[in-house]
Image (cartoon, rainbow, N blue to C red):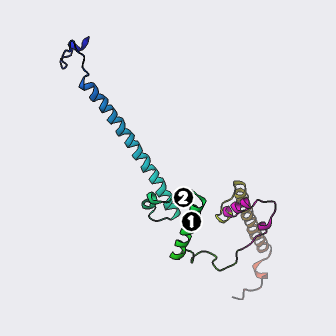
Amino acid sequence: MYRSFLPSRAINHGTRHSSPSVSSTLDERAKRKEKETKKRMEQAGRLSRARESTLDYRLGIKGGSMDQHRRPNPVTMKGWASLVEDRIEKARLEGQFKTVKGRGQPIVQTVEDKNPFIAREEFLMNRIVQQQGAAPPWVEIQGELETAITSFREIVKQSWTRRAIRMLTASQPAALLPPHPG
């Protein structure tokens, strides 16, 4: 064995004992692995909290990161109904429904409300998308084309008017025109 050539280690003859350095290196590896796992878990938690905070900010929820750990998580439909009713009542008491757009006015109905060929879910999704100002790419392109055509027609109309005025002023001498009343 080459152990005898290492100056820092003693020579073991006869009995075989487990070396304290071997067990300590195993303990160090386990501690290091546990520390790395803990660090990864903390980083994952931080990332999750950051995502939640971002969503809360976008939705306009104040103090979202503090309430994150206390959020109820109902399991049954009765639990969900109770949670929803509690939140609606809380919002009503805070007066959040007093500033709702269109409050006290009848709901605007469209022809598509009664269309039997569109599923109710699809109709509601389409209405939400329209209210948010979103449109499929081909609809946006069609709008851009219509805008370009309208502006082109306006330019042609202005150019034709200018040319007609130039032609009239060139063919009619200024002396023959009636005097300007100003």
Residue 75 occupies quadrant: bottom right
Return the residue nearer the eye: 1 or 129. 1
Residue 180 occupies quadrant: bottom right
Image quadrant holding the C terminus, namely bottom right
**Circle 1 — which element?**
helix
Q: Is residue 168 left or right of residue 25?
A: right
Q: Is residue 52 above or below residue 104?
A: above
Look at 30% across and 32% down and name the residue there. 27
Image quadrant holding the N terminus, namely top left
Furthest residue to the top? 1
According to the picture, the residue beneath numbered tag 1 turns out to be: 82
According to the picture, the residue beneath numbered tag 2 turns out to be: 74
On the image, the x and y values in percent for residue 163 come to: 76, 68
Q: Is residue 128 magenta?
A: yes
Q: Is residue 48 above or below residue 34?
A: below
Look at 79% across and 73% down and name the residue there. 168
Q: Are marks 2 and 1 in contact (CB under 8 Å)?
A: yes
Look at 66% across and 66% down and name the residue there. 131
On the image, the x and y values in percent for residue 53 come to: 46, 57
Q: Earlier in the sequence, mark 2 or mark 1?
A: 2
